[in-house]
Image: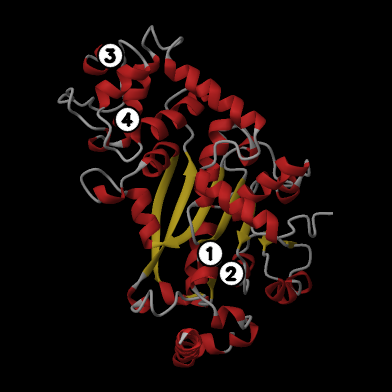
Amino acid sequence: MFHTRIYKRYSSFNILTRSYSRGVKDYLRKNPELLEIKQYIPDKYLKTSSKIANEYLYLICPNAAHKIADHVVSAATDNQIIAETNTGLGLITTELLEKGIKKVRMYESCSEFRVDLKNFATVYPGRVELFIKNLFHLSRFTYMDKQDGMNRVSSLLKGVPRKAWTDDPAITVIGTMPNLRFLRYLMASLALQSGPVLYGRMQLYAIMKKTHYQTLTATPKQNLRLYRHTTVLFQLLFDYETLETFPRNIFLPWEKVTQKPNLQDEETVLIKINFKKNLGIPTGQILSLFHFVKQFFRTGNNIVIPTMEKWVPDCGLNILMPKLEHDFDYFSDINIFTKFRELEPPQILALFREMINTPTYAGSPFTAMVENELIKTETTETGITEAVLQKALTKDAETLNYQDDFD
C-alpha cells in the first residue's frame, strides 16, 4: 500500500513536469522570435520551476530587452559602472552595448550561460567584464566573508569608484529580482554603513514579480494587507519609479502549473530604484530608524503612544504636539488609540524625529536596545539580517562552495 502511494505521487510529479516542459516549448514555438534562442537556454530552465524561480529568473524576450535598455541609456552618465546581473542570454547587455554604453559588467552564476557570454569579449573587445557570481546574492557573500575572513564582496565590487552620497550613483545594476532579499540587505547595509553603501549610492533597474512590487509600494489606504515594516523602510530610504510592465512568461523558469495555473495572466514590473540623496535624518541615526521601524511597526498593530512611551518615557507629548518642522502636513488627528499601520511612511519618520528630540531619549531603553543590537551585529556572523535569512544562508553554506572562482 505504501509503495502504491509513492508510485502514484511519483507518476503525478512526472506528468506535471512533462506538462510544464511542453508548456514552455509550446510557448516558444508560438513566438518565432523566441524560438531561435531556445538552443542557448540550458535544459534545466525549460524543465524545473518554482524552487529555481525563487532565486533566478532569466529574460528570453529581445523586445523587452530593447525597452529596458532604452530606459537605462537615457539616464546613464559617463562616470558610473553599468552592470547586469542574472545576465542569462545577455539580451540586455547586447542592447546596452549596441546603444552606445562603453562598457558593461555581466554577473552570471550559471556555467551553461557563461559559455556563450564569454564570446561577448570577442564581439565587443574591451567593452565587457564577466563575473561568475550573482550580484543580487551579496548578502550571502557577506555572510561567508564574516565566516572565513575572505573578500568576496570587495572582489565583486572591484573597480567601483567611491563617491559622495550626494553624487551620481557609483554603479547601476540591471537585473531580474526574484525575491526581496537584496533590497533588505541594502537597507541593513545602509543602517550599518557597511558593504556596497561605502561606495556611494547604488541604482537599480529591477524586474520583479508584481506581488513584490505591490508589497514595496503599499500604503495604509491601499493594500493595507501588504503594508509592513519592509514597505515603510523601502519608501523612506529609496526613490523609485515604475517604468514598464512585462508578462511573466517571458522569463524562465516558469512556476509549476499546479501553483500558477494562469502564468500568462501575471505580470512583472520594471522599477527604477535609487537611494535617496536626503534621508531626512543624520547618517548616525539611520541604524536607530531601522530598529525603530522593525521594533515598533512589526505587523502594524502596535498602538503609537503607549508603545513609544514604553521605550522613550515622556515622548508622547512631543508626538501629540510636535516641536520640529516637517516637510509635510503633520497629522492632526493622532490620539492614544492610533496604530502604526494607520500612518504613512513620512508620518512614521516624523514620529521618529520627534522621539529622538525628546530630552529623555539619550538614556532611554530604546537607545540601550539599539546599542545592544549593534554589539550583537559586531560579534555575530549574520548581523541584523532576519532569522529566516540566517537559516537560509546557513543551509547554503553547507551545500555550496562560495569560494569557487574568487581566487
In primary-sequence order, the first of circles 3 and 4 is: 3
Mark 1 vs mark 4, CA separation in Å: 36 Å
Left of 310 or right of it: where is 398? right
Specify the farthest residue to the left.
333
Q: Reply above or below: 148 against 277.
A: below
Residue 27 in the image, given as x and y percentages of width and height: 45, 87
Q: Nearer the viewer, residue 127 or 370?
A: 370
In primary-sequence order, the first of circles 4 and 2 is: 2
Q: Amino acid at mark 1?
A: Ala
In primary-sequence order, the first of circles 1 and 3 is: 1
Q: Would you name the residue on which mark 3 appears?
A: 318
User: CB under 8 Å between callouts 2 and 1?
Assistant: yes
The N terminus lies in which quarter of the figure? bottom left
The C terminus lies in which quarter of the figure? bottom right
In primary-sequence order, the first of circles 3 and 2 is: 2
Mark 3: which secondary structure?
Answer: helix
Between label 1 and label 3, give the one nearer the viewer. Answer: 3
